Amino acid sequence: QAWLRYAPLTGSKTGPPALPQSIIALNATQSSPVFTAGQELQNGISGIFNKHLTVSSSHSSASHAWSLVQRHSSRTHSERLLELEVDGFWLNVKGSAVQIVGQSDRGALYGAFEYLSMLARGNFSDVQLVSNPAAPVRWVNQWDNMDGSITRGFGGASIFFDNGVIVSDLTRAAEYARLLSSIRINAVVVNDVNANFTTIQPGNLQGIGRIADVFRPYGVQVALALDFASPMEFGNLTTYDPLDPGVIQFWDDITENIYDIIPDFAGYLVKADSEGTPGPLMYNRTLAQGANVFAKAIEPFGGIVMYRAFVYNLLDESVWTADRAKAAVDFFQPLDGQFLDNVIIQIKYGPIDFQVREPAHPLFANLLNTNVALELQVAQEYLGQQCHLVYLPPLWDTVLNFDLRVNNETSLVKDIITGKRFNRTLGGSAAVVNVGANDTWLGSHLAMSNLYAYGRLAWDWSLQPDDILKDWIQLTFSQDKTVVDTITQMSMASWPAYENYSGNLGEQTLNDILYTHFGPNPQTLDNTPWGQWTRADHTTIGMDRTVSNGTGYSGQYPPEVFEVYESLEKTPDDLVLWFHHVNYTHLLHSGKTVIQHFYDAHYEGAKTAWSFVPMWESLKGRPGIDEERFEDVLFRQNFQAGHSIVWRDAIVNFYHNISGIRDDAGRVGNH
Ligand code: GCW
């Protein structure tokens, strides 16, 4: 149930509100989101207040009612409805009279969820609010494979696939749709970006159609990741060249088949020419030519193409100027303006790969005539894989509020992805979520705050991480002040702690990067072609990404940003090793040396992770903290505490050994 428990209110000071007498889901046909909204309100009110209300689909004489209507079917509502944008809603609560009006069917459902969220948090005030989304694309990606495994999935097996086919029981999929809809996510890509052509073969397409059927009542559309080489793999063609007429026909036919089965299909996600996946470069076609074939095929049906910017080649570390972080701008910037209007370039928040700290991806400043979307990762691939509490919005915030100063004007990433900054009509975000069959969805109760926060942010990027967190805690646990304050404190301290005991100063996360991406293994970063280098030797460390003496990456940013990061003096400590190659004894702005910062930060981070255990223990028996969840979280917090020490000792010893420099506090090595 996650944050949709609708548990009886505990720890709330106010008494129950004046509740309406019945629910009207106006003109709702079964399986429409308006119908779902009626059901949801009925269940929610019954759970929170133990009061059973009837639902009807037409006006009755009841004076205290909810009406859930679409904008177009209403003549009688306030002129504020004119302010509604796509998927927006109007919520009008006056005591026991409540009106919820959506611009679309799913807008009405979002309004119902909003009202229920207020009630579940003990907020019984009258409101009149119009709420519109920041952007039309609010997607999640699942990296589920047809065999039932999930790439970088840490919450059990796939809820969609098993043994090469779509599972017959889609109950969990429907529950996932409900969660997503409550945070206003409007589409889900159900299969891994490293796609397998079998997903779109006829038998399986029917199954995908069944998934779409269970998602539809929640207003969540289905999308698919495509395997670029499908025309060869099962189309009996000898090529997958995107300009080949047979290939174009193949994709047109596939698209038509899909829309026959799923008329409201959302679109395609494409990972091409990346980490071994096939793509247009194989035929000397540009990435834009590749993307546009899908865009043309899907345009008549109103679908879109999310084309990933995660394209890079393997590199040779002996070349000082080689730099994976530069790849996306090198590939995509020359193509700016060549992508069709229903293509969106999906860009990871930083140019390497979901690291604990990265500067905002420079591609956001280089595509002024192309739609873009931000890719986040709720699955904590490099960030403890849900065995560590890491509340991600403070990390996301560093990117969203990164000012790229395009044309010397304010250019926040959050305004670029919504389309606002460069006047694009399409834009938004996608998050890699990877929920699985585990009861907790992500494998950990506390990790669910990241999914909740993602949805809230995708609707409104101006929300503050701690405000979202408080809502989530109240919905998930209770209104009890100690519970709210303690989990807030733990969560807000968690990303800084993780950064402290993993990789500091912008030198990346220092996980094992070859296989697991879990746990410390700093020696795996260098001497590989993957380009996630630290360039650490006995005296120096860091990637020189300057134009003057390094890879030139800093030159991919607009001049005002470039000037800051090109200069060692001006670069903030937290990214110094991302941009510069320095001595371990280099003095930071903080007054510490790089190496002493490593030592101190690791001890401090582990200490913070340890403090989460007694903090969590202090919540035993408090309202909303049931035995089962208490024990489950405690187990994980104990693990994190121990593993943070493994991290600390692995990293400090590694750098102590390589540099031979003593720790001023005498904790590391033999003194
Ligand atoms: O972070 C890397 C992952 C790969 C993933 C890739 C991507 C699905 O290790 O497993 O592939 O990113 O984002 O495409």
Image (cartoon, grey):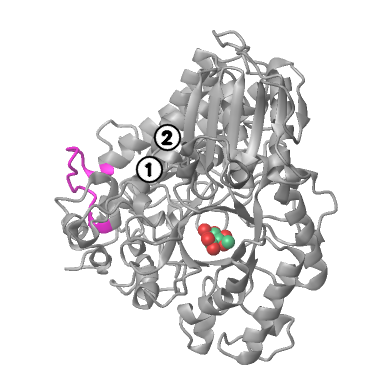
Q: Kindly tell me whether residue 610 is visible in this rendering.
A: no
Report the disc number at residue 16. Answer: none
Q: Residue 593 magenta-drawn? A: yes
Q: Residue at x 62, y 31 (%)?
A: 3
Q: Residue at x 46, y 40 (%)?
A: 392
**Residue 5 percent coordinates (x, y):** 68, 27
Look at label 2 and name its amino acid: Pro
**Residue 442 percent coordinates (x, y):** 63, 41
Q: Mark 2: is the Cβ under 8 angstroms from ligand 1? A: no
CB under 8 Å between discs 2 and 1: yes
Q: Residue 662 magenta-drawn? A: no
Question: Dominant secondary structure of the magenta stretch?
Answer: loop
Please name whichever residue, 322 or 541, is drawn nearer the observer in this view of the structure: 322
Locate residue 64: give its quadrant: top right
Please name whichever residue, 641 or 628, is drawn nearer the observer in this view of the structure: 628
In this image, 285 relative to 504: left or right?
right
Q: Kindly tell me whether residue 459 is visible in this rendering.
A: yes
Q: Is residue 375 above or below residue 597?
A: below
Residue denoted by label 2: 465
Residue denoted by label 1: 397
Q: Is residue 329 above or below residue 522?
A: below
Look at label 1 and name its amino acid: Asp
Q: Earlier in the sequence, mark 2 or mark 1?
A: 1
Location of the C terminus (image quadrant)? top left
Q: Residue at x 70, y 38 (%)?
A: 26
Please name whichever residue, 219 or 570, is drawn nearer the observer in this view of the structure: 219
Dot 1, how many residues are within 10 Å of its Cα: few (below 14), some (14-19), or many (20+)? some
Report helix, strand or loop for mark 2: helix
How many angstroms separate mark 2 from mark 1 (CA)?
A: 8 Å
Magenta-drawn segment:
579-595
Locate residue 637: give its quadrant: top right
Dot 2, how many residues are within 10 Å of its Cα: few (below 14), some (14-19), or many (20+)? many
